[in-house]
Image (cartoon, coloured by chain):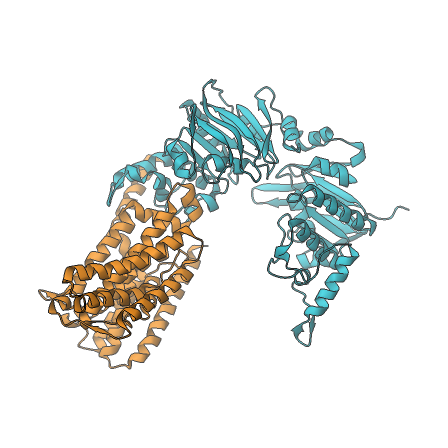
Chain colours: A cyan, B orange
Amino acid sequence: MESPNLLEMRRIMKAFPGVVALKGVNFELRSGEVHALLGENGAGKSTLIKILGGIYQPDDGEILIEGKPVSIKSVLDARAQGISVIHQELVLVPEMTVAENIFLGREMSRGGLVDGKSMIEEADRLLGLLDIDIEASAKVGALTTAQQQMVEITKAMSFNSRILVMDEPTSSLSGKEVDALFGNIAKLKARGVGIIYISHRMAELERVSDRVTVLRDGEYIGTVSTRETDNDALIAMMVGRKLTSYYTRTYRASDEDVLEVRGLGDGRFLKDVSFHLRKGEILGFAGLVGAGRSELVKCIFGVDRFTSGEIRIEGEPVRIASPSDAMSHGVALVPESRKAEALFLKQSVKYNISIKVLKQFIRSVFVDRKKEEAIADRYIRDMSIKAPSSAQIVGNLSGGNQQKVVIGRWLATQPKILILDEPTRGVDVGAKAEIYAIMNKLTETGVSIIMISSELPEILNMSDRVMVMAGGTITGALDRTEMTQERIMQLATRRA
Amino acid sequence: MDTVKASGVRKRGAWLGNPFVAFFRDNLGIIIGLLAICAILTVMSPAFLTQNNIFNVLRQVSMNLYVACGMTMVIILGGIDLSVGSIIALSGVITGGLISFSHFPLGPAVACGLAAGVLIGVINGAIISQTTIPPFIVTLATMNIARGAAYVYTGGQPIRVMSDEFNFIGAGYVGSLPVPIIYLVVIVLVSLLILNKAKMGRHIYAVGGNMTAAKFSGIKTKNVQFFVYVFSGLMAAIAGVVLASRMFSGQPTAGQGAEMDAIAAVVLGGTSMSGGVGKIGGTVIGGLIIGVLSNGLNLLGVNSFWQYIVKGVVILIAVYVDFLKKNASEK
């Protein structure tokens, strides 16, 4: 008789206000297996993992560990069941030692005082079991990212975990470090640990995983053995959906280049980025999280420095060393994270919209309040911002309206080139459609738009052309006839 | 949006935007508090509500309020300026010393005293804007440097200035109105203009509210930081010159603890230490509450040491009430 699976998740359902994250997802894990979990952003991977880790409770469905149904109501429950999650952002305390981090929260004590020596001895023993060459007394902050990850693995193993979840473990590792990690994974497999491996890097999945499960839009698509499949088949499973078009783009052809970027690199991550933007065009930038798109536009906008390459606006080379330089050339950037990077949450809509154009209505200490109101009202109207008055505090608006405030602020500067980084993230469907309509109208007046988006339907609907980035460089350019989800995904997952 | 409704809402918004109405609406709590304290004191002491006494109170709080206006901007920016007390001493002794020892005429001597305060402000502003060293540390250091400079310059002794001209600066009257009150009105007006009207004011709120967003908006955050600390230094220097004038001497020990009194007024007035919000009007009320309390306790013959305790308790109550208000609105 076949021994039961180490883990089985059956028909898991989870809904949040406004969105159903998981629609009856199945997942199983065998002991000693590396099982990859694959899917686009928003497919439901992290929700599933959070349920396994005790952070969320499923609305329906069941979880079985070694054949027995379990209820995981908290992180402590999860740990008691032998489940450990290693997140993408490592949760270590840099100023503490390896030993202190491993035993964080459950320090060994003797007579009421923390027993540092025993902790170091025990930590050394655990590190030795995994053949990890790190001193338990070393400060975590002094270790490389790869070594820090090993500390996290050791910590997880010290809980006698049987199920280990690794979320994008190689995103900050170099080639050699990835090899070392895979070596450790092999050791864990030999000990019967089951590993759930989340990653977008197809090449790695090929190397390290035994099976792959694909999720799409919260649905379970299928599970295949890694040996019996290939990249194209997996991509097809990931994206094969019918597109519901929000909006039809009325394409306006123009041959003049309004922006040209040649060979841009920042000496750290971005390498040799070249592209051009035509007047009146919407140029989509697709790619996975971490591909370098936001970094690229921050360089173009003057927030970050770039060390090589040049930028030409309307044919003339320009020097952009600060946001005010960029603005003087007619470039505007609506950043990715509106709350952290754009909004003054405690201030009014009027303040937020007018902050960039104060010169238009303030002369030394004379404020033309009528003009200020007029500016605010114009954009409230144009963008259909739903707020009781322009004095409304922005922090109280919905995400969609907040996003419109930021866009309105930038439109008030009459830009030539508008860069939108994830313009509809966290925005409801109604506001999304309104923002698309605004984008379309803008291009009709000659504004050129660069749109970064991780939502493929958005890219496909709104872009005239698409640039795909991966690993800090451009992996491909597609025009309207070549744009398919599969093709974009292929370029996005290619290791440059 | 329905145009009729929209215009109705806009009209109401415009009325509420009227500065006086806004002043009362924003600071209702502390205004009531101030009036309540005044009412209680009027009942308890007949000497309270006289013109003489009222001018006394205003004159006493004015020096703290000069500094507090500058401190309001600093705290809105998200920073702090601990050097103001030492600047009070430094500007006083330099002005006094230049008049008494170097026989400078009054005007240039005062100008140099103010310049000394501005210089400390420049040092603060330059270091804070160009580095990531926290303002607390920078101004703590300049606090010591300025105080030390005052001691070095004076050899540790007060500098007597037997000049009626000089004394008029701080102790004179225009009609029956003490001169420091006139300065107070001017300084409050200038501060209001800067914060509420000028572009710089909005930039101060922006940098204090969300520095990243301010940078992304092309605001030259370094310039804003520099300006605020220089302004704070100037305000403290003005307070220092006025104080020295009233005492007929420049004292190297002057102004000790002044930074705390200024911060107390600012915080009582509703400005948040986390930055991004705050008003001059509130600071003025805050300073008045502290001043009225001190004055009242004096009139009632209460031991002056108790005043420290009362001051501290009032500040705690005020920020607690503010905390409750914030929690209620963030539902």
The one of B249 and A458 positioned closer to us in this rendering: B249
Residue A473 sits above or below residue B110 on the image:
above
The one of B193 and B105 positioned closer to us in this rendering: B105
Quadrant assignment, res B38 = bottom left
> Residue A185 vs residue B237: left or right?
right
The one of A206 and B312 positioned closer to us in this rendering: A206
Quadrant assignment, res A265 = top right
Q: Is residue B112 visible?
A: yes
Furthest-left residue in this view: B175
Furthest-right residue in this view: A1
Coordinates of residue B245 in the picture (x, y in percent): 18, 68
Numbered marks: total: 0
User: In the picture, which quadrant includes the N terminus of chain B?
Assistant: top left
The one of B1 and A473 positioned closer to us in this rendering: A473
Coordinates of residue A122 in the picture (x, y in percent): 74, 64
Q: Name the residue rendered at 62%, 44% in the picture.
A: A15
Coordinates of residue A234 in the picture (x, y in percent): 72, 32
Q: Is residue B1 visible?
A: no
Coordinates of residue B206 in the picture (x, y in percent): 38, 48
Furthest-front residue in this view: B102
> Residue A199 vs residue A272: left or right?
right
Residue A46 sits above or below residue B266 on the image:
above
Quadrant assignment, res B285 = bottom left
